[in-house]
């Protein structure tokens, strides 16, 4: 299955839950906004903001 290349501003929580986001896109979101995505058994479980000191 090919995942369409989305601009990170177009990514929704539904995209995350459905596995429609690549690891490269998740890394870009983390680097720009500091959000961490948690998954269990290949499924998205939660999103949280990294606390930077």
Image: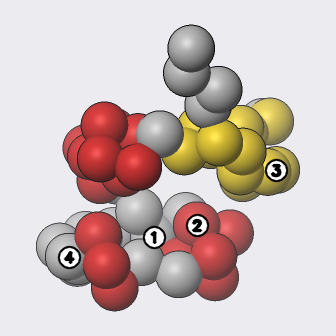
Q: Which residue is mark 4?
A: 7
For marks 1 and 3, give the CA distance: 14 Å
For marks 4 and 2, give the CA distance: 14 Å
* Residue 46 visible, this orientation: yes
Residue sitting at 61 percent across and 31 percent down?
Answer: 50
| Residue 15 falls left or right of residue 26 | right
- Residues marked 1 and 3 touching at CB (< 8 Å): no
For marks 2 and 3 on the same chain, the one whose residue lies earlier in the sequence: 2
Residue sitting at 29 percent across and 70 percent down?
Answer: 8
Q: Please tell me in which quadrant of the rendered image residue 2 appears.
A: bottom left
For marks 1 and 3 on the same chain, the one whose residue lies earlier in the sequence: 1
| Disc 1 element | loop
Q: Which residue is mark 3?
A: 45
For marks 4 and 1 on the same chain, the one whose residue lies earlier in the sequence: 4
* Residue 18 visible, this orientation: no
| Disc 2 element | helix
For marks 2 and 1, give the CA distance: 6 Å
Where residue 24 appears, x then y in whole percent?
25, 44
**Quarter placement of the C terminus:** top right
Q: Which residue is mark 1?
A: 20
Q: Nearer the viewer, residue 48 or 25?
A: 48
Q: Please tell me whether mark 2 or mark 1 is closer to you in this view.
A: 2
| Residue 5 falls left or right of residue 32 | left
Residue sitting at 65 percent across and 26 percent down?
Answer: 51
Q: Please tell me whether mark 4 or mark 1 is closer to you in this view.
A: 4
Q: Please tell me whether mark 4 or mark 2 is closer to you in this view.
A: 4
Where residue 47 appears, x then y in whole percent?
71, 51
Q: Please tell me whether mark 1 or mark 3 is closer to you in this view.
A: 3
Where residue 6 appears, x then y in whole percent?
23, 77
How many C-alpha atoms fall within 10 Å of the one at disc 1: few (<14), some, or many (≥20)?
Answer: some
């Amino acid at each position: 299955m090919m995942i369409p290349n989305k601009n990170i501003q177009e990514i929704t929580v539904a995209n995350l839950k459905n596995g429609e986001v690549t690891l490269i896109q998740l890394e870009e979101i983390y680097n720009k906004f500091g959000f961490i995505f948690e998954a269990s058994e290949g499924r998205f479980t939660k999103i949280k903001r990294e606390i930077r000191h």
